[in-house]
Image (cartoon, rainbow, N blue to C red):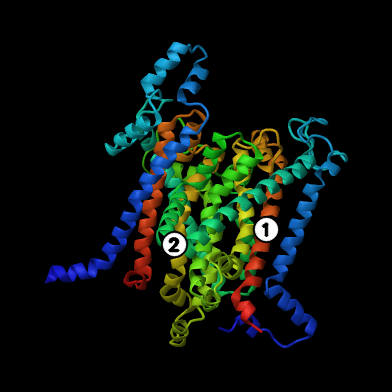
Amino acid sequence: MERPMIASRKLGSPVKDGIAFFKESGYLSLTVGGAVFAAIVVTAAAARLLFPGDPTDMVTTPLLWPGQSGLFPLGTTSLGQDVAAGLVWGARASLQVGILAAAVGLLLGLVAGTLAGYCGGWIDAVLVRVIALFQTMPPFLLVVVIVAIDEPTLRTISLAIGLAGWPTVARLVRAQVRSLRQAEFVLAARCQGYGTTRIVLGEILPNALPPVIATVSVLVANAILMEAGLSFLDMGDPNIVSWGSMIGAARDTLRIDWYLAVLPGLAIALTVLSLNLVSDGLTEVLSPRRRAAP
Amino acid sequence: MIKDHVMKRAGPWLRVVAGSASFALPTILGIVILNFLFLQLLPGDAVDVLAMRSGSATVESISALRVQTGLDQPLSGQLAAYLSRLAHFDLGVSTQYHLPVADIIAARLPDTLLLVGGALGLAVVLGLLLGSVMASLAGRWIDRMLSGLLMLIYSTPGFWIGLMMILLFSVKLGLFPSAGSATIGTRLSGLAALYDKAAHLIMPMTALSLFYTAVYARLVRATMIDVLRQDFILAARAKGLHPVTLIRRHAIRNALIPVVTVAGIHLGNLLGGAVVVETVFGWPGMGRLAFDALLSRDFPVLLGVLLLSSILVVAVNALADVLLGWLDPRILTE
């Protein structure tokens, strides 16, 4: 089918055409989202250089408003902690949980989805039931219970969020693998006498991955949102500053010192937005319709 | 003869319902057992919490409490006892409040259904509306602006939006109450009570639904752009149908299909996400009940809420299956 956006493009200068193509093809959101996310990652990585002290330490007068003091441009909390330091160190916590949880969810989802999709039969039937089981439980409650079972450390939280997120990946991978299992190039590979492992890893998975890749950044984004909710409820790692816990602590002074709740919320929104932009861009760039187009 | 005919007509529907049910029952049983075993992994039990709170517990009183609550029994015995009680529709007694779990949950159920059901309904309706507008104006500035706005909402935690709403609408403007599900200390009835409830409901419901509104609007937009390119739409347009009628009569059914499919799954996410929103707004729902039960190791209540949540999710998914069959009769013949 003809893509209307390309069809509607008027013949013009090559520069304008180039810009239009850049905007329509998904590369724009990919670039912008990627750049913002990279900037956040760099800031988080440099936390020790930027704010060497412990962000939970009291450093000055409590409840300075942003701009009130040159030394603390984003103000201080009711405990006299530097908000800017909290935001930068919070980025570390959010990114760690987001990436680790996405890795856990991706790994579990890939293994389960590939097994179910390729093997079929009773393995598929059992895995589909397990996926349905996990999707029937409210994921946030599941995460809260798992975190309560173990200590609320970043590792446990990531693991719990990953466990809640794998069914989405598994369903997607299963559907992809199922549709590719009888594809001609797979049959050809089978005729060549390739082993199952080689067919799955070398032939099926590379072709099944494009939609999964776009899901990865959504997984990270959702994990960051979930971690924020968790630490907002005081279920986060008590030794670590996170954006959610900053918002949670700001609830008590919301009526007057609302900047304490606004700033970390904006940080979450910016990070998650950048990841969603990357995902949207990747979906567009990796879509088969685009690859088929000349 | 007539009966045969009816059976034939009803056949596909019965198959859908029977299919959902045969899938649902083992799922629910699996969830009960899984949840039960899961909670055993938690450090400490209800007796520990009660002993800690009373502050004057002795070894004797603790072991007496364990016998009384059945927590001294081996795990398999506890599970068997729980399942046999469930089979008699008995959810047990809360270790914290000493009230039947069924009563505690029943007291919270209407407010939960109002909040979660309202949020899901609002998200579907608003999502359809926004998605249709965006699809029919695809590429224009309204579409671009709405897309950007929805992307932003899609990226923002709902509980934070809730806090911002409290700040704007309760603190600054004084429009809506910031907490609770009804004004305390008043005995309202009739319209006044309804109005009071709505004023309390509107902010938590919106905060909970905005994320899903964005999801559905994006989904509807994408589906409808594809639908609007098809031949039957061209034919409808050629016979001179008004664009709004075109969407309402011909396109919306198709665009609803992916929304209904995911909305069933989303109910679980909404029930879980309600924990945080209920905390922000002090809404007395099941999410908060489950969270408090977890903190005080009140397993009968927690298990009851988890069980009821799963039943709700399974029921809504079955409903979604039926709805899908109505939206796209081809599904029934498969």
As shown in the figure, which amino acid type bears the numbered disc 1?
Leu
Q: Chain of mark 1?
A: A
Which disc, if any, is residue B261? 2
Circle on res. B190 = none
Secondary-structure class at tag 1: helix
Badge 1: residue crowd in 10 Å (few <14, some 14–19, many ≥20)? many
Q: Residue furthest front?
A: A193
**Which picture quadrant has residue B97?**
top left
Q: Disc 2 marks which amino acid?
A: Thr
Q: Is residue A131 above or below residue A120?
A: above
Horizontal arrangement in the rendering, residue B308 relative to residue A268 (left or right)? left
Q: Position of residue A110 (x, y in %)?
A: 56, 58
Q: Are marks 2 and 1 on the same chain?
A: no
| Above or below, A27 relative to B96 | below
Among the 4 quarters of the image, the one containing residue A246: top right
The residue singled out by tag 1 in the image is A275
Q: Looking at the image, which residue is at 57% across and 35% down?
A: A150
Residues B309 and A190: in front is: A190
